[in-house]
Image: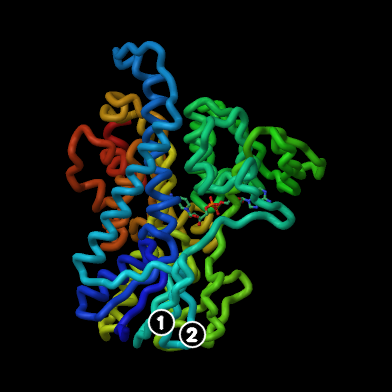
Amino acid sequence: MQYDVIVIGSGPGGYICAIRCAQLGLKTAIIEKYKTLGGTCLNVGCIPSKALLDSSEHYHNAAHSFAEHGIKLENLQVDLAQMIARKSEVVSQVCKGVEFLMKKNKIDVYQGKGSFVDKNTVKVTKDSGEIEMVTSKNIVIATGSKPSSLPGITIDKQRIITSTEALQMKEVPKHLIVIGAGVIGAELGSVYARIGAKVSFVEYASAMIPTMDSTMGKELQRSMKKLGADFYLSHKVKTVENTGDEVVVTAENPKGETVTFTGDYCLMSVGRRPFTDGLALENAGLTTDARGKIEVDEHTLQTKVSNIYAIGDVIRGAMLAHKAEEEGVFVAETIVGQKPHINYSLIPGVVYTWPEVASVGSTEEELKAKGVPYKSGSFPFKALGRARASMDIDGTVKVLAHKETDEILGAHIIGPRAADMIAEAVVAMEYRASAEDISRMSHAHPTYTEAFKEACLAATGNRALNA
Ligand SMILES: NC(=O)c1ccc[n+]([C@@H]2O[C@H](COP(=O)([O-])OP(=O)(O)OC[C@H]3O[C@@H](n4cnc5c(N)ncnc54)[C@H](O)[C@@H]3O)[C@@H](O)[C@H]2O)c1
């Protein structure tokens, strides 16, 4: 079969790319090695983790805040099997949704492992061993990423696990040692801390979520401590060993001493690596860089072989589903000769803990390092009537604006519904709004979004109206 575009990989980058190609009139196929479409995000990433985050948050609220709301409960229990079953049902529904979208857009789906034969031909090897050849004018590599480990540490998937196994646990860990207090560590660590596990974070950097504005990491750590989590920051993990019923982790503490942690499970959340195994890139004249990424042209996302494009986790930039989606649309439109644009500096980052953390634009540390003159305005959620009403008073909004022009340069939110609130900051910054612009726009009362308006007001140097 001859196509205009073949997309390899059906995660959010790949399936969105295929849909946009089809919408633009291109004869499109998508190849997926797993039985279900949707890639990491839908099957073992964003969606199942959010399902468990929501379930565990409901339990946590039932255990800790329902009484204050005037709701009495007796014999409250965690039914982990049901939590996991509901998560699986959610996953199944969203995957079926992608299947439906493929049919609706007349995209041919090939189930099997794709590998290059040459720059226009992909061999699809089905689980049964059956082989099919597909050819296309253009090919888009959207094969995503896999969890990475540390040198010398083998993930056995039994006690030394990744996010994938942490989404299908058969028991609540007694003591979960989380290596790496980044996004995955924070999210899955909070799931199990809420439902009764002792959670210890062992993190190499001096703060959790170290790539975000430092205020966010400090606030998140404070809220995770309320869940009973322990933090061992500036600790470099050296070894992890499964001893049968236990897992033993050794790390070097800031004094250079070796410290040991013992738990029943260890979650490795030290980052992800691009996934290109088995693609036979060399047959198409492609290679990967030292970090395993496929190099692309900054302006077109073409690889060095001009009819082959790459998007999402397999190329440079943030490993985020919504970044991959933007790139999927970008490539489809580029193929038909349009001139699309992605503003990489305004891709928001979110951590789905509770309170949630969401960020866009520059951090305070980045502005300092670049010598950009800035001013900062903050507003705590505890001063909002809406937050008082829902008992979600932890967190703050921090807005960074240019000292002279007042243009918003960064917005950093930790608090209730921060993940949704950040959209306002993205729109404001895309239109290059000043902090004063936002502070003069009406925000519905009572809403959490008032905190963003108030932080903008504070950044302008005006006095907050509600604090
Ligand atoms: N909500 C979301 O958007 C979301 C959710 C899950 C994953 N992701 C993405 O998936 C990718 C992987 O997530 P992640 O949490 O694994 O990576 P991450 O990069 O967010 O965090 C990894 C952490 O591991 C630490 N680390 C590295 N080596 C260490 C060592 N030897 N000892 C102790 N700590 C060490 C790092 O300092 C870092 O804090 C990220 O790019 C992330 O953005 C995003």
Residue 183: give x, y in percent of width and height: 50, 48
- Relative placement, left or right, of 397 versus 447 is right
Residue 399: give x, y in percent of width and height: 38, 48
Judge whether 181 appears above or below 127 on screen. above
- Assign the N terminus to one quadrant of the image: bottom left
Per the rendering, the mark at residue 133 is 1
- Relative placement, left or right, of 413 versus 176 is left
Looking at the rendered image, the disc whose residue lies closer to the viewer, 1 or 2, is 1
Residue nearer the viewer, 152 or 382 = 152
Can you tell me whether the CB of the residue at mark 2 lies under 8 Å from the nearest atom of ligand 1? no
Residue nearer the viewer, 147 or 127 = 127
Query: Which residue is painted at 68% across and 44% down in the image?
Result: 234
Query: Which residue is painted at 52% across and 47% down in the image?
Result: 163
Per the rendering, the mark at residue 111 is none
Kindly identify the amino acid type of the residue bearing the numbered disc 1: Met
Residue 178: give x, y in percent of width and height: 60, 41
Q: Could you say whether the residue bearing mark 1 is in a helix, strand or loop?
A: strand
Query: Which residue is painted at 25% across and 80% down in the image?
Result: 27
Query: Which residue is painted at 20% across and 73% down in the image?
Result: 23
On the question of residue 417 being in view, the answer is yes
* Contact, mark 1 vs mark 2 (Cβ under 8 Å): yes
- Assign the C terminus to one quadrant of the image: top left
Q: Crowding near pointer 1: few (<14 within 10 Å), some, many (20+)?
A: some
Q: Quadrant of residue 348?
A: bottom left
Kindly identify the amino acid type of the residue bearing the numbered disc 2: Val
Per the rendering, the mark at residue 117 is 2
